[in-house]
Amino acid sequence: MLRALFERCLDPARLDAWFETSAEAQYTRRLLFSSLFELMTQVVLRQKPSVR
């Protein structure tokens, strides 16, 4: 249920737009903020064993 909430409220386009408006010194080179968020969410919810 938590995953469904994340997918609905925190879609990748919205996360990337939020990052662009709030980032001061950070920048996007190859990895988008939404991709990092998705990966970390999978690890936290134990869908993947680790980031690697």
Image (tube, rainbow, N blue to C red):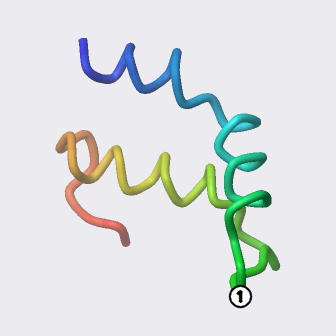
Q: Residues within 10 Å of mark 1 (few under 14, many from 20)?
A: few
**Horizontal arrangement in the rendering, residue 38 relative to residue 21 (left or right):** left
Q: Residue at x 27, y 53 (%)?
A: 43
Taking 32 as reference, is 7 above or below it?
above
**Horizontal arrangement in the rendering, residue 35 relative to residue 52 (left or right):** right
* Image spot of residue 20 (x, y percent): 78, 60
Q: Residue at x 21, y 40 (%)?
A: 45
Q: Residue at x 26, y 21 (%)?
A: 2
Taking 13 as reference, is 20 above or below it?
below
**Horizontal arrangement in the rendering, residue 45 relative to residue 12 (left or right):** left
Which residue corresponds to mark 1? Answer: 25
Q: Residue at x 24, y 11 (%)?
A: 1
Q: Out of 17 and 22, give the one closest to the viewer.
A: 22
For badge 1, the amino acid type reads Ala
Q: Out of 23 and 49, give the one closest to the viewer.
A: 23
Q: Residue furthest bottom?
A: 25
Q: Dividing the picture into quarters, in which one does residue 26 lie?
A: bottom right
Taking 2 as reference, is 25 above or below it?
below
* Image spot of residue 39 (x, y percent): 45, 53
